[in-house]
Amino acid sequence: MQAAPAPHDDATLSIELPAPGNVPPARAKAEMRAIHEAIARVEAEAKASCAAESRAHAEARARSLAEERAAMDAAAAAAALQNAQPSEDAIEANRDRLDLLRAAAKASMERLEAVRQETAELRARVEADTTIKLAADARAKAEAEARQRACEQGAAEAAMAERATRAAAELELHTEQARLQAAERIAAVHAAKEEVLHIASADARVATLARERERHAKGARQTAELLAEAEADALALTVQREKADQIALASAFARAVAEACALEEARALAHIEQEREAIAIAQAESERVAAKSLHLRLQTEKELRDCALQRERIEQMAALGAEARRDAEGRIMAATEARILVGRQLREVALARALAEQHAADEVQRNMAAQQSAIDAAQQRASAEQDAAAAAALETQEQLRACALAEQSAVLAQQGAELCALDNAASAAALDALAAQVALQRGSAERAACHAEQAAQLESAEREHAQQAQHALLAMQEQLAAEQALACAAQARADAAQAGAALLRQQAHAERRAELAEQAELQAQLAHAAATGVLAEQAERASAQQCAAVAAAGAPLLRAVELADVQAQRAQLEQQALALADAALAAEQGAVNAARTALALAEQLLSAQLENGADQARENAITAGRIEAERATALAQQLRARTGLELAELARQIAEEEEAGAQAMVDKRDAQRLLLGSAQAHAALQRKAAVTTRAMADARAQLLESDAARHALDCRALVEADAVLTGRCAEAQQHAASESITRAVIGRLLTQPGALPIN
């Protein structure tokens, strides 16, 4: 087997010394082999250019198909947009209808809230009346206990005031000491902080210097290592250089003979090598352009695959959107049926509400009639009382008869109301939704009129109560004047035991009626007790804070500032307590003076109490009638509120169903928009693929141009190689001729007689 010939490397330039006798045939063989390789390369490039043209044709066809598909996708997107517009209009209409339903539900909730507020006001009024009665009873019981506690609290308050003054002085002293200690601690903390900052800065500088020293040492070590390696390399290079110099000196003599021929050959080979280098550069450029075009083609194919996957996903999403749209349409149909059913229920509830309001109106009218009869009876009783006190028995009989007549009239009114309710129920059964709304409005107007009449009645009752209060005030003024006159008489009869007993009895009765003075005194005492408790708590807290301040001597200034604020607040509270104590003492003195002046008027006060008791009895009767009317109104309002709650619940259900339908429409619109966006994205990707294909075609055109230029360079190189080969053949012939001439001349010289032998 023969060894395979080594592949020819164009980038390697080897210069060999010509062997005597066989140099031209070997060189001619190598050059012929290079020529054959160049021809094969040109054929391969021609095949590559044909393949590139076919590929460009296929890419142009793919680009045209992509443009057609983009146009189809754009048309589909426009159609989807046109189909999405009616859906958006329907969604807007459903949204408007949902807003209307929400507004109706909000209005019904507001009406329900107004009814609840009216009910709460009525309940609060009843509770206030009851509370006033209970407070009046409890006030009389608390007066005796308050008087007993007043004397005890006076002494306790005086002692407490002295203790508070001493505690305030001690607290001021402790506060000043705490402030001085806090200032000293702040100065010490500031000095410690400065020292710590100085030490930290010094440590930071030392650490920085240490890091710099380590970095310099490391750099010095690396530099020393590099110097050692460089010295070793220099020694090795010196040894190699010496060996090379020896070899060069040995071969200089052998190379001197061939330098003349090698110089010309080197020049020719250098020229050929430059041309080959230019060819290699052009080939590398063409390969780079081919690689770039291949990369672009692969990227385009990847984008096309991504577009296909995206389109498949979009089609799946469109299928899901269509299914969701069908489900939403089904839900909308169900919601519509439920809304129709709820509308029927609303009409039924409205009819029932109209009947209930009619019953409530009849009940209110009956209550108004009963109240009017009670008011008339009360007026008759008041006139009878003013005319003669002796006709009380006759007035009682008339009141009983009036009550019987009122009960009979109430029974008759109830029967008439039942008949009217039956007639109204028979007539309301034929009304539609509009008639129900009119009935509701009429009922609300009637209720407003009833409320206005009740308010007028309450205002008249309050006016009568105010007149009675004015009469009582005049009586109290007269009693005060009489008390002053009787006080002078009491001072004159102070030595008599019977007068003293009478004064004690009158004082007991007067103390029961001294409400204003006792109320003021009780409030002052309560405020003073609260202030005393606060002072006690503050004193305990101050002692605890002082102990804590002594224990925590090293606390910051913030603790001292808070302690100063607390002490300032404590001083303010102590001042307020002192002011309240002064006010309590003044109130006690006023109460004592009032008790002294009110000793002699017990009998007149008793008569006034009897008159007030009669007035209170009449007021209680009026209040009882008013409470009954308010109870009936509250029951009617509760029924109306219950009906309103049912209507609100139905409206809420309708709103939820409308919201579900609107959400389904919104989902449908979003799916359509998503489909449209995906179609637009697919069209954009296809346009991008077309642009990429066009760029690939341009790159292939540039590659063809570069291949053509390289082919021209190869042809020129072949021509130059033929010229060089022809020149070398001529030189070889000339060299052979010169050698033959030289041999002939040497032969003639040797054959001549007398020639010297050549060693």
Image: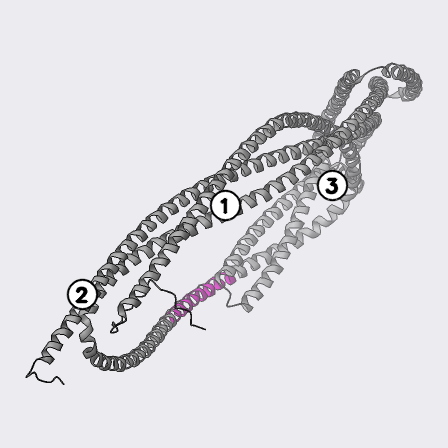
Q: In this figure, which residue is indicated by the disc labeled 1?
A: 300
Badge 3 marks a residue whose secondary structure is loop
Taking 579 as reference, is 348 above or below it? above
Q: In this figure, which residue is indicated by the disc labeled 3?
A: 494
Where residue 331 appears, x then y in whole percent? 75, 32
Where residue 221 appears, x then y in whole percent? 33, 78
Asked where in the image residue 128 lies, by quadrant, the reply is: top right
Mark earlier in primary sequence (1, 3): 1
Disc on res. 308:
none
Q: Quadrant of the N terminus?
A: bottom left
State the extent of the magenta-drawn residues as a range: 173-200
Mark earlier in primary sequence (3, 2): 3
Mark 1 is on which residue type?
Thr
Mark 3 is on which residue type?
Ala
Q: Does residue 620 appear in this view?
A: no
Taking 384 as reference, is 531 above or below it? below
Please tell me which residue lies in front, 719 or 156: 719
Q: In this figure, which residue is indicated by the disc labeled 2?
A: 734
Where residue 270 appears, x then y in whole percent? 24, 62
Residue 179: within the magenta? Answer: yes
Name the front one of labels 1 and 2.
Answer: 2
Query: Quick check: 575 left or right of 633?
Result: left
Query: Quick check: 696 left or right of 646?
Result: left
Per the model, the C-alpha gap separating discs 3 and 2 is 180 Å
